Amino acid sequence: MNALVQTWRVACYEWFDALRSRRALVVLLLYLAAAVCNMHWSINLLHKLESELATALQLPATEQAGVVSTALWKSKPFQRMMKRMTQNDLVLRDITGKHPVELIYAWFAFFYTPLLVVLVAGNRIAEEIGSGSVRYVIFRTSRASWSIGKFIGQVFMIGLALILSGASAYAVAKIRLAGSGTPDLFLNMVQWSLRAWVYSIPYLGLAMGLSHLTRSSSKATVMGILAITACFVLSILIRHFTTDTGWRAYLPHLGQLLPDGHKMLLWRNAPAPLIAGSATLITLGFCYLFTGYAFFRTRDV
Amino acid sequence: MDYAIESTELVKRYGARRALDGLTLAVPRYAVLGLIGPNGAGKTTWMMSIAGLLHLHGGTINLLGCGPFDPAVHSGRITLLPQDSELPLESRPIDLLTHYGLLQRLTRHEAKRTAIEMLREVHLEDRLTATVRSLSHGMRKRVMIAQCFIGSPELVLLDEPLSGLDPREAAHMRAFLTRRRGRQTLVISSHNLNDIEAMCDRVAFIEKGRTVRNTTLDEIIGTSSMLLYRVTAEPSDLSAIGAAVPGATLSFNAATGTVCCRYDPNRDSPAQINARVLPPLLAQCGVIDISRGDSLEAAYLRE
């Protein structure tokens, strides 16, 4: 019980301190700006497509984007494109009815979250080991409480960033896109932020786990970026080389060790795959973290 | 005797080099122990091992009678001022010390009150909410000292606590640490032997990862059993002076220009010795200064 309280205290302070830290704040603002710009440009693109469609069909041009996008979204060519992108019929079925804004934001959040994680939290542990500030803490609490507390603090931080980016993307859509200012859409955007947040946890575990291995802050960031890149490359290679027979048939099992192996579960609507995917990704995050911690618990600080 | 620290046969290796080579050192409860030794002798390694920051290759440690360091048992009872360790630069002293207090299981109210009290004690009451980054080196050092005394721990380990402080703050911190005598067990590592002499009641000499000597300051510098007379010239007949103080031993040190009189404190008081030594000594030479015991520096260099 006491260990949990200590972990919670470290987590709260980590969050509080990260919020005040100028560097974390700058990265958060950049992420927020990227979410806003992504939404803005995506809506511009959507408007352009709609105008071209209107010209081709000899219809009057629309003033605001979004007037025909729902119909466009449900058209056969677009569905074929989406199928190629998702490579999953169940996911395709689930996302077909979604508002375009939701999908634009979800794509952005899922794509950039790993990068946000590395930039915000990738070096937090290495930085404190390197500067020696960890020495003021670990005679007051256990190394495990410190490591897990730091991790949870950063999970809060990423969560805040994603929810803010979701809200700001909604605000842009409300201003720029016809018929997108509904409370339902806002709630859906927050829901996508939460899904991206869960998706960020294994990457955070990976980056912070690696951060235990070095005293150099910059080395930890580089290691985090390399590890996340390796995850993406491995996922692509596994998808590419998987076959139905032979040893290659087992490759998807290897993919289960990577966050990407469970990503599509977070795009589903049904609670069962969502819960299973979330639980697996959170567990994966802690496993990555504990692998780094196993080294840290025996090292001198 | 009740010990705050009992460390026996400690071994710590860095590759082929042994930073601690069977170091055995016991610190009685409520003692203020000064750790003295050359660079690389193992003082910092010993302190870090005691606080659980380093993993040992051998030996046993018993802290406050509860075995080796375990944060679940010793959190809040032991604190450390580590050497060359930065505080988190973006933190504010008040938040940081409150956080440390909370980790030591103080209530939020107690933690905040103690944090303010300690920062006031180190003269940083006007910098409570400044970031650590904006503080000068000396100010940061004072925050580091303040964090050691949050929650009145039973054992405080201080590695070079006064280095980097200006003379006024150093004197203030010296007085502050001296006031803790008898209330907490302090272990102070310093290369400034005058500081150790002013603050400590016990001294341990460490060399090459081993304890060379661990005893009271009094025994080492002879405060209660030795009088030193700085003289203008070598006394011509030391035996004549010795005859005036039976049971005492007199010697002349030409390098320092002092006559040393070692006596039995159970038999004579310093006043009685002075009354007997001074008349024959003054008849032979001038006396510039009289002091009780040797300086720690001289005693250390003599070892």
Image: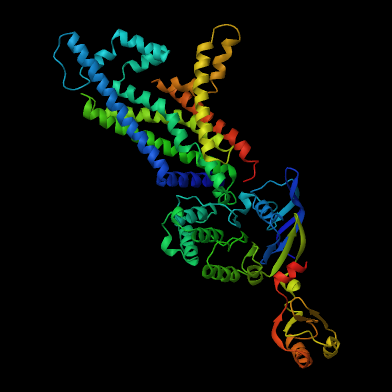
- Which corner quadrant holds the N terminus of chain B? bottom right
- In the picture as drawn, the residue positioned furthest to the front comes out as B233
Looking at this view, is B299 or A187 the one in front? Answer: B299
Taking the spot 45% from the left edge, 49% from the top edge, the residue there is: B90
Using the rendered image of the protein, determine whether residue B215 is visible from the camera's viewpoint.
Answer: no
Residue B289, position as x, y percentages in the image: 69, 84
Total numbered circles: 0
Residue A190 sits in quarter: top left
Using the rendered image of the protein, determine whether residue A133 is visible from the camera's viewpoint.
Answer: yes
* Left or right of residue B262: residue B105: left
- Which corner quadrant holds the C terminus of chain B? bottom right
Residue A166, position as x, y percentages in the image: 33, 31
Taking the spot 74% from the left edge, 62% from the top edge, the residue there is: B205
Taking the spot 62% from the left edge, 54% from the top edge, the residue there is: B74
In the displayed structure, A26 sits above or below A47; it is: below
In the displayed structure, A210 sits above or below A262; it is: below
Residue A27, position as x, y percentages in the image: 40, 38
Residue B196 sits in quarter: bottom right
Residue A23, position as x, y percentages in the image: 42, 42
